Each structure stands twice: as structure tokens, then as C-alpha cells.
Image (cartoon, helix red, strand yellow):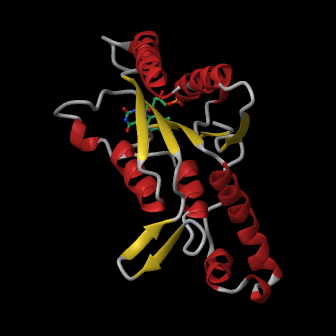
Amino acid sequence: MKNILLIESSPRGNDSYSHQAARSIVNELLARNPGAKVVERNLGENPPPHVGLPFIIGMYAAPEQRTPVQAKALALSDMLIDELLAADTIVLAVPMHNFGPPSTLKAWIDHVARAGRTFSYGPNGPQGLVNGKHAILVVASGGVYSAEPMKPFDFTEPYLRAVLAFLGITEVDVVRVAGVANSAIGPEKALATASAQSKQLLAQIA
Ligand SMILES: Cc1cc2nc3c(=O)[nH]c(=O)nc-3n(C[C@H](O)[C@H](O)[C@H](O)COP(=O)(O)O)c2cc1C
């Protein structure tokens, strides 16, 4: 393992449980792979803009045909894609917001899912171009979604698994910081469970 990409998407900074659990995983990966490099993207602090018309028109134009406004709109996308392609392990810290990922992470996905760069259309349909990566999702939520009646409300993990697979990332593990707002669980227990899950996962991969 040489390059780790840490994507943080909570607006809560150091108080964020998903950030705390994801950072523990990254620190452990670093301890086991001392030469590894970490690139950090804090989307909560620096949210990518929503994609707009210049982005969409520029995306379908050859780079030399883009207007300056379109080129600027695509520059961040290119940078985020370069970071993704350079990584071999991607750790995503994800707070559940209204049953799905936060809008900052959705904006990041809109910037990195680009035909010709991260997926292509072939004779057999779309094909992911981001191959050979391992993603670890660290999902924090107020409630617990591992069982009925709440399981069908979890659009976070299934959505992220689907979009990552679309891009070619099929090796995905998930750590849940679940139940931080549940009176029977709370943040301390939820983080302890996440830590145990992380240890188990790291024992398998590193
Ligand atoms: C805007 C917003 C929406 C939320 N929606 C949900 C939700 O749909 N389900 C849930 O279980 N918790 C929800 N929560 C609680 C968060 O998932 C919980 O506070 C979690 O710790 C957030 O991750 P973080 O600590 O990394 O910021 C929401 C919190 C916020 C601020």
C-alpha cells in the first residue's frame, strides 16, 4: 500500500464521529505501512460546488475546446479524479444525513464520476475504470440500520457501494458508527463497536 486517500464529509470537524473512526483506521494503516502517503480531502470544510452548466458542457467538450469558464469548472474535477486514481486505499468518512450521504460527498461523486476518465461506455454497457482499489466506508448515524424496521431507510451504504462499483471499485468494506443518538447506545459505545469492527477488518487486510 503506497497511497491512501482520506475523504471526510462531515461538517462537524474534529467532533465528527465518522472522522474520528476513519482517522483511527488511517493511522493504523500508516503504522503498518510506514512509507505510505496520505492525501486528505475535507469536504465538510471545503465542499466542492454543485456541478453547473459550464461543468456539464465542458465535460462533453475536448479540453482544447473548453471556454475559460468551462475549463475552470472542470479543473477541480480533474484534480479530484487524479487523487482517486493515484490512491490504492480510499477511506471515506460518511455522516448519514437524511438517510443518505451528505450533499458534500454527493458533490464529490458528481465531480469524480466522469465518462472517459473514471468509467467508459463499451459494447457491454458502462465499465468502471477505477480498478484495483480498496475502499473503506466509515458511516456514522444517529440510528441503527442493520435490521428492520430501519434497514430499508439506509440509502447511504447501498448507494455508495453501487456508485463505487460503477466506477470499478468493488472491494469495499464498511465500518458503522451506529446509534450515536440512540439512548441505549450513544457515541461511546458506537465508537467502541466501530473500533472493534476496524480491528477485525485491518487484521484481514494488513
Ligand atoms: C442534517 C442531518 C441529518 C441527519 N439525518 C440522519 C438520518 O437520516 N438518520 C440518522 O440515523 N441520523 C441522522 N443524523 C445524525 C447523524 O447521522 C449523526 O449525528 C452522525 O454522528 C453524523 O456523523 P458525524 O458525527 O461524522 O458528523 C443527521 C444529522 C444531521 C446533522
Whether 194 is drawn above or below 138: the answer is: above
Whether 96 is drawn above or below 108: the answer is: above
Residue 99 in sight from this viewpoint: no
Residue 112 in sight from this viewpoint: yes
Residue extending farthest left? 148
Residue nearest the observer in this picture, 183 or 154 = 154
Identify the residue at horizontal 54%, vertical 58% (top origin).
Answer: 130
Q: Position of residue 78 (x, y in %)?
A: 71, 64
Q: Position of residue 141 (x, y in %)?
A: 41, 30
Identify the residue at horizontal 76%, vertical 67% (top origin).
Answer: 75
Q: Position of residue 55 (x, y in %)?
A: 66, 74
Q: How many numbered marks have been drawn onto this rendered protein structure?
A: 0
Identify the residue at horizontal 33%, vertical 47% (top origin).
Answer: 158
Residue nearest the observer in this picture, 48 or 158 = 158
Q: Position of residue 66 (x, y in %)?
A: 76, 85
Identify the residue at horizontal 68%, vertical 81% (top origin).
Answer: 58
Q: Is residue 15 left or right of residue 45?
A: left
Q: Is residue 2 left or right of residue 144?
A: right
Q: Is residue 178 left or right of residue 148?
A: right
Q: Which quadrant of the render holds ligand 1?
A: top left
Q: Kindly indicate the quadrant of the structure image that contains residue 52.
A: bottom right
Residue extending farthest right? 68
Q: Is residue 96 left or right of residue 55?
A: left
Q: Kindly indicate the quadrant of the structure image that contains residue 36.
A: top right
Quadrant of image for the N terminus: top right
